[in-house]
Image (spheres, rainbow, N blue to C red):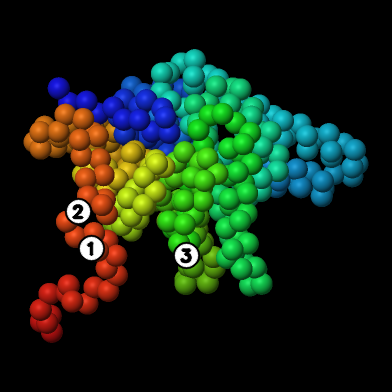
């Protein structure tokens, strides 16, 4: 009998499919439906530090009475936080899914206390969603990386539940960052975060929002780094995000060394039934290849598992082009 169960961040999941932080995970009612469709775990919709800062700054700017502004700011912040904590508690009461809270933060200040409250509310783990946009030409990359690692260290030293870190793909050396996260007691990393990006409308000559949905081809960038990371930092769990649209994509990520995959765009495009389809594909593929457990093939094709480990380090592709094109 095929067994899709996996262990991620020390948590027991019935399968590797995690619904990533999104509107799909923004309420207990929605999480109940995700469980019915077979999700292995959920990452709650993120609570945003910049939203708290923005709302309270707005009150400070436009209210005539500073004392009242302080009071309203504290109320807005408290209400936002309390609503999030209540969602955690409800989700734990109504489902058996592992609940991973998500903090979208840019500093390590009051999030330390908030992480403690997340743990008390019953969350099984925390996913830190950190992105510090490097807009200061005088700030070197070491200083930026230290900020990331300082946030991770502060949170992991505060809570006893496991902490993972969702990273962007543009670090100079992602392997070094992952190693340092592990040294600071991070239990996992998510590769990769897909950030908001602006676009330009040339008809209106104006800024517009870029496409928020991932494309299946984006998975290829992750596969290389999953394979390298799982081989070189094997004690940290990897979840792959961005570009996982099908069961085939999920199998590829697991073969490369991921423990789990996170899905979102596929649900927007194909509905919650996409989870059922992915699980059915994985089950059929495992039967075809006579694998009983996910652990039988997870990491089989990481850098240490393949006959040619240099394959993952090749970056020049001209010699792989076919013969001269017909013009």
Query: Residue, x 38% and y 33% (percent of image)?
Result: 8
Query: Residue, x 39% and y 48% (percent of image)?
Result: 233
Residue 156 percent location from the top left of the image: 58, 37
Residue 185 percent location from the top left of the image: 52, 40
Position of 173 with respect to 34 (left or right) is right
Q: Which residue is mark 3?
A: 172
Vertical relation: 148 (above or below) 266: below
Query: Residue, x 58% and y 52% (percent of image)?
Result: 148
The nearer-to-camera label among 2 and 3 is 2
Q: CA distance from mark 1 to mark 3?
A: 20 Å
Query: Residue, x 85% and y 44% (percent of image)?
Result: 63
- Residue 204 badge: none
Sequence-first tag of 1 and 3: 3
- Residue 311 badge: 1
**Element at label 1:** helix
Residue 51 appears in the rendering:
no
Q: Seen from this angle, which residue lies furthest top? A: 93
Residue 3 percent location from the top left of the image: 22, 25
Pointer 1 and pointer 3: residues touching (CB < 8 Å)?
no
**Element at label 3:** loop
Q: Quadrant of the N terminus?
A: top left
**Classed neighbour count for the residue bearing mark 2: other residues with Cα under 10 Å, few (<14), some (14–19), many (≥20):** some
Pointer 2 and pointer 1: residues touching (CB < 8 Å)?
yes
- Please tell me which residue lies in front, 6 or 214: 6
Sequence-first tag of 2 and 3: 3
Vertical relation: 54 (above or below) 6: below
Q: CA distance from mark 2 to mark 3?
A: 25 Å
Q: Quadrant of the C terminus?
A: bottom left
Q: CA distance from mark 2 to mark 1?
A: 9 Å
Q: Which residue is mark 2?
A: 306
């Amino acid at each position: 009998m095929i067994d899709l169960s996996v262990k991620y961040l020390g948590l027991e999941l019935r399968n590797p499919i995690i619904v990533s932080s999104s509107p799909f995970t923004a309420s207990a009612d929605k999480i109940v439906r995700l469980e019915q469709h077979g999700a292995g775990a959920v990452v709650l919709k993120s609570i945003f530090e910049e939203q708290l800062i923005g709302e309270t700054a707005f009150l400070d700017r436009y209210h005539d009475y500073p004392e009242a502004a302080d009071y309203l700011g504290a109320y807005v912040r408290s209400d936002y936080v309390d609503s999030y904590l209540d969602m955690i508690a409800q989700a734990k009461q109504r489902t058996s899914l592992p609940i991973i809270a998500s903090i979208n933060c840019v500093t390590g200040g009051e999030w330390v206390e908030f992480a403690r409250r997340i743990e008390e509310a019953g969350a099984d783990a925390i996913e830190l969603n950190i992105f510090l946009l490097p807009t200061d030409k005088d700030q070197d990359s070491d200083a930026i990386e230290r900020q990331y690692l300082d946030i991770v260290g502060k949170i992991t030293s505060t809570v006893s539940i496991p902490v993972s870190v969702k990273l962007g793909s543009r670090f100079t050396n992602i392997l070094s960052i992952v190693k340092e996260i592990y040294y600071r007691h991070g239990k996992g990393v998510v590769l990769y975060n897909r950030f908001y990006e602006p676009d330009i409308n040339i008809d209106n000559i104006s800024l517009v929002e870029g496409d928020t949905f991932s494309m299946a081809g984006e998975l290829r960038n992750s596969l290389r780094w999953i394979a390298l990371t799982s081989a070189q930092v094997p004690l940290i769990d990897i979840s792959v995000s961005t570009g996982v649209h099908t069961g085939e994509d999920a199998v590829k990520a697991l073969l490369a060394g991921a423990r789990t995959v996170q899905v979102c765009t596929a649900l927007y495009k194909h509905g919650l039934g996409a989870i059922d389809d992915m699980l059915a594909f994985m089950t059929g593929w495992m039967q075809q290849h006579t694998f009983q457990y996910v652990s039988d093939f997870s990491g089989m094709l990481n850098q240490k598992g393949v006959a040619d480990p240099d394959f993952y380090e090749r970056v020049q592709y001209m010699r792989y082009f076919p013969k001269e094109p017909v013009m």
